[in-house]
Amino acid sequence: MPLSISSDALYRRSPAWAQTLLLNAYGLRISAYRRGAPYRAAVALLAESERWPAERLRAWQDDRLREVVRVAYERSRWYRRVMDEAGVGAADVRGVADLPRLPLLDKETVRGRAAELWTKPRPGRSWAHGHTSGTTGSPLSLWYTRNTCVMNDAVDRRQKAWGGMGERDWIGLLLGRVIVPTDAARPPFWRVNAVHRQVWFSSFHLSPQHLPRYVDEIRRRGLRFLEGYPSTLFILARHLLARGETLPLRAVFTSSETLHQVQREAMEAAFGCVPFDFYGHAERTLFATECAAHDGKHLAEEYGVAEVVDDEGNPVPDGTPGWLVGTSLHNTAMPLLRYRTGDVTAIRREPCACGRTLARIEPVTTKAEDIVVTPDGRMISPSVLTHPFKPYPQIRESQLVQDRADRLQVKLVAGEAFTAGDEAALVAQLAARLGAGMAVEIERVDSIPRERSGKFRWVVSRVEHGCRFAWEAAA
């Protein structure tokens, strides 16, 4: 069941009033799929379970895990084979403590054997489809049950509640969808989804010329909450501070990129509140959120099971950094059991000052990225440029390099299945987001070099702009 409007040609061609109607129709469709009684039940559960004793929460996890493993073993060709090879049957996995008996699942397997992971010969009519970003590597094609999507919305609602946001409060969003045509020269640079009380602001018009319009609109609407990528909200915060202004908010919510200390401090100064950073991913195995103590992120242990392992895949003691591994407790469409996320963190189980009993993780180490600035001065968050890559699993790795204001070089490691037509479509989608003044050039390469630190930066910008800072110092 497709749940995205970002590539909807009808939306892009429509006038502003029709886009608002389509956005609200999309909101109603989401509500019909994800909300209602199951969602309310999940929200109620999460409000209670966040303070359960550890033993009760573990028993709940064990019960959910047994069901997911049973379905995976009985209906997925992949899990039947690898579990049989490991000499493990579904009945042998009685709970979380037995997870290490199962093999780890890596991204290459999900990418290359997706259909074997499905629990039906073909995707079910009620399943929802998703993708990873497909930037540093090929995108993963994923399928979820409705219950997975319901629980995803419920844990997101809990995060908003922890930040003081009620069900009836409005929020401004600065995310990755092309919500306003990128060639629009005049406001409004936003559209309103009244169904979910959201104001969707364009992330593609953040120029010194237009940023004051964003601030005015946020003030005019009396918005007290914002959500966006750290780099996008950082642009807005730096704009305010450069003008000697503040925009007092109740809370800001950040995700999808590493939130660096310099960005957090700028947001605190500009918005008068501490950001609530949260961790999630398209694979829908783990979700972790900050509470008001802002001391690590609480794992949504009702959503998935987190493990941390060493390079050989062996579990490490709590408090020891290692590779983060996630197991969904809800997705029986395409189960991901012991999935290696590629991120590094450590698990903490000591009590939190907030009184919640959910375990926490340390800051997650991912990749550092830069901001692209267009010739007309718009600053573009790297995360909003991931979307054009999602349809192309043929791309094994990619990197964007901006060496001058009017040129973006796209380095691609891709197989022969990535055709000239695919290349032209990718260029067109990037150009649609960056504007006519930016040349987009594709360069096929055999490999993409890492930084001296060994880190991989997906976006490398060598153009001066107001949101540059030293990544090595920010790590």
Image (cartoon, rainbow, N blue to C red):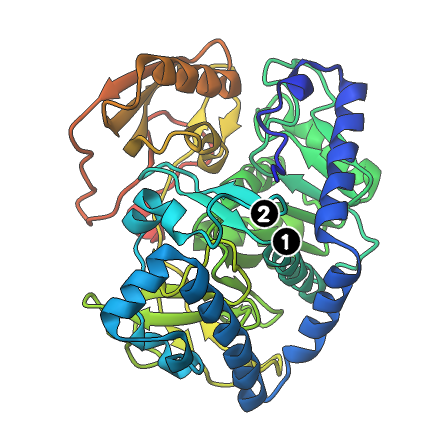
Mark nearer the N terminus (2 vs 1): 2
Q: Which residue is mark 1?
A: 146
Seen at 67% across and 47% down, the residue is: 226
Q: Is residue 245 visible?
A: no
What number of labels is visible? 2
List x then y, in percent, for residue 76: 41, 57
Q: Residues within 10 Å of mark 2 (few under 14, many from 20)?
A: many
Front position in the image: 176 or 273 = 176
Q: Nearer the viewer, residue 399 or 237?
A: 399
Q: Is residue 240 left or right of residue 85?
A: right
Identify the residue at horizontal 59%, vertical 57% (top origin): 148
Going by the numbered disc 1, the residue's amino acid type is Arg
Image vertical order of residue 290 relative to residue 125, above or below: below
Residue 237 place in picture, x, y as percent: 58, 42
Quadrant (top left, top right, bottom left, bottom right) of the N terminus? top right
User: What amino acid is found at the position of numbered circle 2 in the picture?
Assistant: Trp
Q: Residues within 10 Å of mark 1 (few under 14, many from 20)?
A: many
| Proximity of marks 2 and 1: CB atoms separated by less than 8 Å | yes
Q: Is residue 349 visible?
A: yes
**Residue underneath mark 2:** 127
Q: Quadrant of residue 180?
A: top right
Say which element carries label 2. Answer: loop
Q: Please state the horizontal and vertical placement of residue 143, each as a whole percent of the image.
A: 51, 47
Q: Is residue 15 above or below residue 295?
A: above
Q: Secondary structure at mark 1?
A: helix
Instruction: Give the Cα separation between the discs numbered 2 and 1.
Output: 6 Å
- In this rendering, the answer to whether 146 lies above or below 125 is below
* For residue 130, side relative to residue 139 (left or right): right
State the residue in front, 466 or 61.
61
- Location of residue 156 in the rendering, given as x and y in whole percent from the top left corner: 64, 58
Name the mark on residue 174.
none
Q: Residue at 36% of width from left, 25% of height from top? A: 463
